[in-house]
Each structure stands twice: as C-alpha cells, then as structure tokens.
Image (cartoon, grey):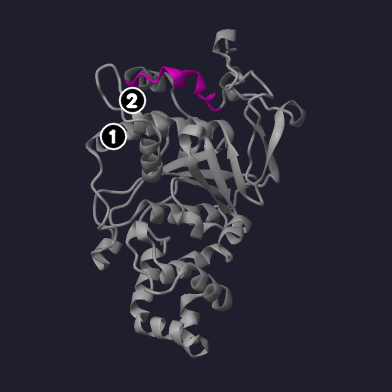
C-alpha cells in the first residue's frame, strides 16, 4: 500500500466542507453582512476555520469535500433518510457559492461525487491517501467520520468555531468516549440509530444495552448470530427488528469506493496567489482576516506586524505534526505577539500553559 515514494511525515488534511459550513453559519450572528447587504456570517466562519487550520495544523496537503445537491444511494434505498431535516435558510443557501470561492482562492482542490455524501468522499480519499503512504486529518463539524479513525486517520471536530475550540480524536480517544473501537460505531448505530440522519435503530435498545452488546459481541452480525445467549427482552427486540438493524448499519456505514481519485501533488497546501485572496477578502469586507493570511509555500520571508496590530488575544502558533506526542497551546497571557504570517515556532518555555496529547486525544482552544 504505497506509491513507492518517500513519505515520512506526509499528511493530508481533509475538510468536510458542508459540515463546517453549517457549523460556521450557526456560530456567527445572522446580522453579519457587507455594506451592500450581502450575508457573510457562514462564509466568514468557514474562512476563519480554514485560517486557523493553516495556522495550527500547518497542513502539507489539503483538500475539501462537499455534498452534491442530488440524492445519494442512501436516499434511493431508504426514502426516510434525512427526510426530517428542514430546508436551509435562504441566507445560508445564498452564501454557499462564496464558500466555494474562498476554497478556490486558496487553490484548494474540491472533491465531490453525485450519488455519494461528502463523508463517503472523505472515506474514499482517506483510503487512497493511506495507499499512498500518507496520513490523514479529517476536519469536520460532526462526528459521523469517527468510524474512519485508525492509526493513520484522525478526526478534528470543530466544537466551537467562534471560540476556536476543537476536539481531536484518535483511536484511544474514540475508545475512551464510546467504550469500543472506531469501526464498531456503525454497529452501535445499527442498534441505537442516529436521529440526526433519521436512522431508526432498534426500538427499545438504549445506549447502555447497545454498548454492552458491542463490547461483548463486537459486531451486529455476531450479535444476531448469538441471539440465544441474550436476555429474553433484548433477544425479542433484535429478532423482531433484525432487518431494521441491518438497514441501519448499512445507512450508517461510510463507503470507501466513491468515484473520486486523489491527486496528492495538486493538493499541496499554501500554493495560492495572495492577490486573489486579498481581492476576495476586500469584496467580502473580511478586513479583520487579512493579517491572518498564511505564508505561501516556498516563501522565506514575511513582513513584521506593527505594534498597532498586536492584541492580548494574539498567540504564537505551534507546529503540529501527525505523529507528535504533544503540542503546546498558547495561554492568552503567555505571549502578546503573534508572529507575522505565522512563520515562527514557539518554545515550550515561552507559552506552554495548556498541553494537548495527540495520541490520547482531547481538546484545545485556539
């Protein structure tokens, strides 16, 4: 499972575009708009998340996935799938083309496929990245992709984009949260369902019972093969709703065969034209984000900030690598100076008041 190249430390960061777009829309007030009246709260929030990722994760490769406005194979196979979700607010829908403009301005490739959800594209690209000896960090606004976590894939969850709070999940963190391994999340959902996606699950089976069943039997198939060993009440429910449980697992499972092909060289991060981004920022009136623009790949120098641009909330950005055991997160009291375009490394003695153990997972505030 390798492309034959030296890929030590190579990491692809994948953004779940629609999930982050939704998260950003609800994180910033509806009143945010340009002087001309164009709503921008979701675009601003999405752009802020993207810039934070450039600053803290420092991706070597980056790509974005989006859902397509067409039914997926899940919708075709189960009409009730996500059918309960309300239509997007008009102000939110109108901002989506602008989000794509932001992604394009940073020269980030977009992957999407008719008939598949963005999660399926994320799963497919993650598998293809591993086949090219590349580790993956998935950045998302929901937890559906936790089933993809393994020793080469981690998930970063944007818990509170406006406050810069992100949760990080590796294998150990998922096991600590759920009590079982990441691939078993789909077996768990086959029992308890998922109300956000309208996945039914087995009526009468709660989280506690489902967790014990997964811990004892590992998979739904193995549970169903040992019904005679289960308590009568649980056995009856599973026997009567066997097909529902199997369908629920099918709906919850992210597939890894979407019709997309990862082009890693085209996903190299920070290969963008600053003038293009600045023009878009001016158009959107994102003046507060201009000094957050990251240094382009290959640039060796960056301008210094003036004292007027400093603030007590500014922090020095750490370098985050996939295999690192810890990275440090700045205290807002530890350093008042942000590096120009984030091109400096900070030492552990200059601002380490919060620690994040990547292997153990956890959360941090950016």
**Over which residues does the magenta segment extend?**
284-297
Horizontal side of 114 relative to 353 (left or right) equals left
Give residue 113's position: percent from left, percent from top.
32, 52
Q: Quadrant of the C terminus?
A: top right
How many residues crowd mark 1 within 10 Å: few (<14), some (14–19), many (20+)?
A: few
Tell me the SS state at disc 2: loop
Q: Nearer the viewer, mark 2 or mark 1?
A: 2
Vertical side of 340 occupied by 105: above or below: below
Residue drawn 52% across the image and 70% down it: 208
**Quadrant where the N terminus lies?**
bottom right
x%, y% of residue 134? 57, 49
Of the numbered discs 2 and 1, the one sitting upstream in the chain is 2
Which residue carries the number 2 mark? 32
Q: Residue visible at 57% across and 58% down?
A: 177
Residue 210 drawn at (x, y percent)? 49, 72
Vertical comparison of 162 with 314: above or below: below
Compare residues 273 and 51 and report the one nearer the observer: 51
Element assignment for label 1: helix
Q: Residue furthest right?
A: 349
**Residue 107 appearing in the image:** no
Gap in Å between the C-alphas at discs 2 and 1? Answer: 17 Å
**Residue 97 bears which disc, if any?**
1
């Amino acid at each position: 499972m390798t492309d034959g190249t030296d890929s030590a430390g190579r990491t692809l960061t994948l953004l779940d575009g629609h999930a982050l777009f939704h998260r950003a829309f609800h994180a910033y007030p509806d009143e945010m708009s340009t002087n001309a009246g164009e709503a921008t709260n979701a675009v601003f929030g999405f752009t802020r998340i993207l810039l934070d990722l450039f600053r803290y994760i420092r991706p070597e490769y980056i790509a974005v996935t989006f859902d397509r406005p067409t039914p997926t194979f899940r919708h075709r196979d189960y009409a009730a799938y996500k059918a309960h979700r309300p239509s997007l607010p008009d102000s939110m829908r109108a901002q989506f083309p602008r989000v794509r403009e932001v992604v394009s301005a940073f020269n980030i490739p977009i992957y999407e496929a008719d008939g598949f959800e963005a999660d399926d594209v994320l799963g497919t690209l993650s598998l293809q990245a591993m086949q090219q000896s590349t580790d993956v960090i998935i950045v998302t606004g929901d937890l559906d992709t936790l089933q993809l976590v393994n020793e080469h894939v981690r998930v970063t969850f944007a818990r509170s984009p406006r406050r810069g709070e992100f949760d990080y999940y590796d294998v150990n963190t998922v096991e600590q949260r759920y009590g079982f391994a990441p691939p078993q999340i789909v077996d768990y959902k086959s029992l308890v369902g998922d109300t956000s996606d309208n996945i039914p699950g087995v009526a009468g089976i709660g989280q506690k019972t489902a967790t014990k069943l997964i811990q004892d039997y590992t998979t739904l198939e193995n549970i169903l093969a040992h019904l005679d060993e289960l308590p009568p009440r649980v056995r009856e429910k599973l026997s009567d709703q066997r097909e529902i449980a199997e369908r629920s697992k099918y709906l919850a499972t992210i597939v890894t065969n979407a019709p997309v092909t990862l082009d890693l060289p085209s996903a190299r991060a920070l290969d963008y034209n600053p003038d293009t981004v600045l023009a878009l920022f001016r158009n959107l009136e994102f003046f507060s984000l201009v000094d957050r623009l990251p240094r382009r790949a290959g640039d060796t120098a960056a301008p210094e900030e003036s004292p007027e641009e400093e603030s007590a909330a500014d922090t020095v950005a750490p370098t985050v690598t996939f295999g690192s055991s810890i990275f440090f997160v700045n205290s807002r009291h530890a350093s008042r100076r942000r590096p120009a375009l984030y091109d400096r490394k900070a030492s552990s003695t200059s601002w380490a008041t919060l620690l994040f153990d990547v292997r153990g997972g956890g959360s941090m505030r950016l």
